[in-house]
Amino acid sequence: MLRKLPLLLLALLPAAINAQLATGSWKVYPVFGIPDRLIETPQFVYLATSGSLHSYDKTNDESRVFEPKVDIAGGRIKDIFYNFERKYLLATYEDGNIDIIPDEGERINLPDIKNANVDSKTINDVKFDDGKIYIATSFGFVIYNDSTFEVDESGIFNVNVRSIGLTPDNIILVTNPREWTYYVTTSPKNGQHHTIDKFTFLVQIFSEPKGFVPLGNNDPSGDTHFAVYCNNKKLYHLSIAANNRSASLEETPVTNTSSIFTVDNGAYAIADGKLLHFTAPWTQTQAISLPEPLMNNAISTIDGPKSLWAADATGLANYKLEDNGSLTVMRDRYRPTDATTFSDISHIIPLTDNRGFMVANHGMSAHFAVGNGDFLELIFSGNMIEDGNVADIEATEGLTFKSSASTNGRRNKGDYIFSPTFLLEDPDDNSIHYIGSGIEGIYVVKDGRQIGKFDENSLINKNANWAWRPSTAQFDKHGNLLVGVYTEDKTWPPLIVLPADKRRKDPSTITKEDWIGLDMGGTIWQRDIVMHQCSKIPAIFMSDAEAKQGFSALYYGSSITDPSDDTALVISSLTDQDGKTFSPDYILCFTEDQRGRVWAGTTEGIFEITNPANVFSSDFRINRLKVPRNDGTNLADYLLDTEKIYAIAVDAANRKWIATEDSGVYLVSENGDEIIENFNTTNSPLPTNCITDIYVDPSSNSIFISTLNGLYEYSSTASPSRPDYSDVIAYPNPVTPDYTGIITIRGLMDESLVKIMDSGMHLVYQTTSQGGMATWDGCTMNGARVKSGVYYVFASVSSETDSQGDVVAKILVVN
């Protein structure tokens, strides 16, 4: 039956509001970054990028992002392969899981490898033949029947099988029995393959194979030929004799290879800036120079150069490439506007005017979520998110390098910022960014181009005479740049300041004399520096990766740029309110709430500095937060004392959102005495329980959650309050018959008394706002769904329950 909304009722309402994320719901931000694999099929183009899966339907002109836990299994996609005969995509995951995604039909999950009782479950390669799926893994190989999708055979060799290939009668495995050693081995298809000794050695490859594709079966001799692309960027020709008893490996003249892929009549390679085509036994039939729009792109085709699909971080496009290199655009580049360009997000950084935020990855670390290492070849990635739209923060032009630690990264990947540690936006010019490098110092970048760099021209010491290693940075409210430095030398200042007036100069003219070094008591000198500027007193707290050292505090008096009245203090032993010593291994974050209390996240839970000024007194005590058991025993447990805490954020109701290493996200009450929510992989779209950062939008009820698998947004029950009721909105509005979720009322004054009344002015529901937001489930106080009609929202800040307040919104409910 067609339902029509009464025009009279609609006239009473403002414009319908449906764009907001419903309270209690999630948004998964897709990832569209540097392509890992691009495959064109007769109907679809599939793209795997940064752990995400995208497709384009050529027939219906539709793009799709596969949502984890909805369209696909979840977790990070490692690689994709397509069975042209049976018309399905096989997607592998980093945890060994497999999804079969047919062109027509429902997804089929194959969890056998993921659930196998083996130490390593990496899937390295997949081939299809004669109704079977052959899978090379880090422990051996597995054969599936692709009619039943059940395991036919498995070989647990405890040897890494890097690649797999097939001749008409034999299986070819490239094994990796020890480092830098790769053997081509063979065994008949109709034999038993449960042990590695069932495979016969043929020939050795002296570089790690990255691509292993057949060249077709058009050799009259019956030999089978493969193109092998190796880590040294060279292309090799592997020939397997027709009797499968011998093989030859020949290095070809092709160098600087970036990818190879198979087609019906041979294989294509991208090498030396050209698109090359080869057929068996080894005949090069095509060599077309790639024009600029196709350079550094992943490329795939089933029809040859007349229809090439190309992808990079800027999007997916279709081109026609002529033999002379001329290019015709068949379909413009497209990427989702809300897609980040990378998935390993470690930091969420507010923009200076709260118009949005930035996200960035992280390199140099000891105990953060990325692990322990220098990450010398990890390239900086950063995005800016405003109003749900994502823009890439580019930093690739005019970069300079002084540290020898950058040598390998530049040789292997090019000129990029390596081992990133932080990202900041200039408070005066939002086109300028400060990007920390764990080996090169601080890059100052404007519109993608380096305009300055702080290394030997600053007080960042050259750590071990090897690298300039800033660990963290912040701006203070005056525009001074504060930098925490991993010095590995206690005689160097771990906190350095570039005063605002010096920062506003041309950054290329800044000298060491422009900087000010501050003493933090001699204990801050390692990695993982975290820093907090107190809002109520002129003080800074800092900690680092030195085990069981507590934290350092600096009272800087009249000005951070005047060290003459500074007092530095080391709080090496933490004593709580009960007189007990608390000795966590590391402090990983500080956050200040609306009352000026500082919460510290550690490797063993959380403690509170109730009054930061007391840090500098002789009787300073921390407050260990406790959650009552409420079981009649009058006992309580320390808040999250078994959790490693990476980040804490404060919402409009002064509640705390807590990022943990192993248990997802916790929402706790203002005082930390109640756990309100715990979101993890079992009850949310989160792909991992390791949460790297949390950001509460100061203008809405959105909570942004970062993981090493991407960015997620949750619509919470609290939003910032307003000074009056002039900007109240309710959504969804109208409430349609199929909607059974939460109705959100936003833009209220703090702790407003909210009453929902029907047209007869009868009270239907009553609540108090969390900050500036209240929610209603669309039911009466007896739990029954309300009848169709207009419902009036009254709000007041009076404490008297009989005060009706003002009508601030109207909600139309249609049943």
Image (cartoon, rainbow, N blue to C red):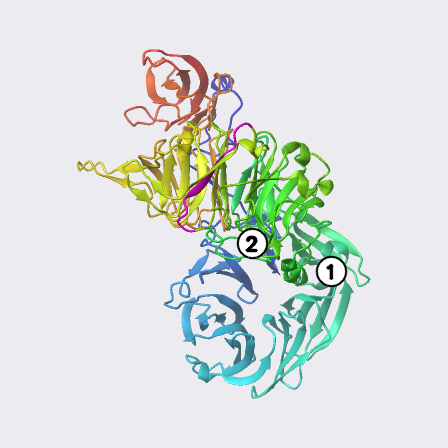
Marks 2, 1: nearer the viewer: 2
Label 1 SS: helix
Q: Which residue is mark 2?
A: 50
Pointer 2 and pointer 1: residues touching (CB < 8 Å)?
no
Can you see residue 739? no
The answer to whether residue 557 is magenta is: yes
Number of residue marks: 2
User: How crowded is the residue under tag 2: few (<14 C-alpha within 10 Å), some, or many (20+)?
Assistant: many
Mark 2 residue type: Ser
Label 2 SS: loop
Locate residue 814, reporting x and y percent. Answer: 42, 26
Q: Which residue is mark 1?
A: 306
Identity of the residue drawn at 46% across and 25% down: 746
Q: Is residue 580 left or right of residue 323?
A: left
Identity of the residue drawn at 62% across and 69% down: 231
Dot 2 or dot 1, earlier in sequence: 2
Q: Is residue 282 above or below residue 734?
A: below
Q: Is residue 741 left or right of residue 101?
A: left
Mark 1 residue type: Lys
Gap in Å between the C-alphas at discs 2 and 1? 28 Å
The one of 151 and 489 positioned closer to us in this rendering: 489
Locate residue 516, reporting x and y percent. Answer: 61, 38
Q: In the rendered view of the protein, which quadrant contains the N terminus?
A: top left
User: How crowded is the residue under tag 1: few (<14 C-alpha within 10 Å), some, or many (20+)?
Assistant: some
Q: Is residue 404 left or right of residue 122?
A: right
Query: Which image quarter: residue 439?
Result: bottom right
Q: In the rendered view of the protein, which quadrant contains the C terminus?
A: top left
Return the residue found at the far right.
324
Locate residue 179, reporting x and y percent. Answer: 53, 74
Can you see residue 379? yes
The one of 493 and 727 positioned closer to us in this rendering: 493
Magenta-colored span: 547-558
